[in-house]
Image: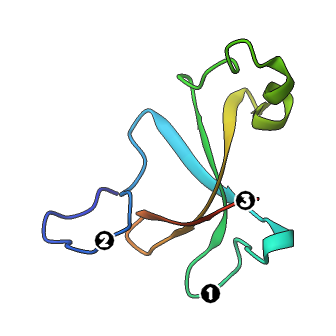
Amino acid sequence: TAMEESDISVGRTGGPTTINQIRLINWEEGNYRVTNRPFPQGEILIGGDNIAMGYFKRPELNDESFFVENGRRWFRTGDIGEVHEDGSVKIIGKML
């Protein structure tokens, strides 16, 4: 869902666009898990038909950043986020 106009909170990105999916995966080293409460936390993945095929002239990064699962292309952002009850995502860190 999209954020409401009356939402004046800061640091949140809103929900995904209609052409993309966003999901979190566990990052065990940082103790971020999709089962964390009160908000699920983990590395942010962006999926959809418009995800790049890879980095331009940087093929060594492609295998660690891009993958296909069940016919959908995904990009591992390296950002740590948490998903709030309204579907908005808050970026809370970066994987190192």
Which residue sits furthest bottom?
Answer: 38
Q: Residue at x 44, y 32 (%)?
A: 19
The image quarter containing residue 76 is top right
What residue is pinned by disc 3? 95
The image's mark for residue 63 is none
Left/right placement of residue 21 relative to residue 63 reads: left
Can you identify the residue that label 2 sits on? 10
Where residue 79 sits in the image (x, y, percent)?
62, 55
Q: CA distance from mark 1 to mark 3?
A: 20 Å
Give the amino acid type for the residue marked by disc 1 in the picture. Answer: Arg
Q: How is the image coloured?
A: rainbow
Neighbour class for label 3 at 10 Å: few (<14), some, many (≥20)?
few
Residue carrying label 1: 37
Farthest residue toward the top?
57
Q: Residue at x 68, y 30 (%)?
A: 72
Q: Residues within 10 Å of mark 2 (few under 14, many from 20)?
A: few
**Quarter that holds the N terminus:** bottom left
The residue lying at 37 percent from left, 70 percent from top is 86
SS for tag 2? loop
Which of the two discs, 1 and 3, sits closer to the camera?
3
Residue type at tag 3: Met
| Chain-order first, disc 1 or disc 3 | 1
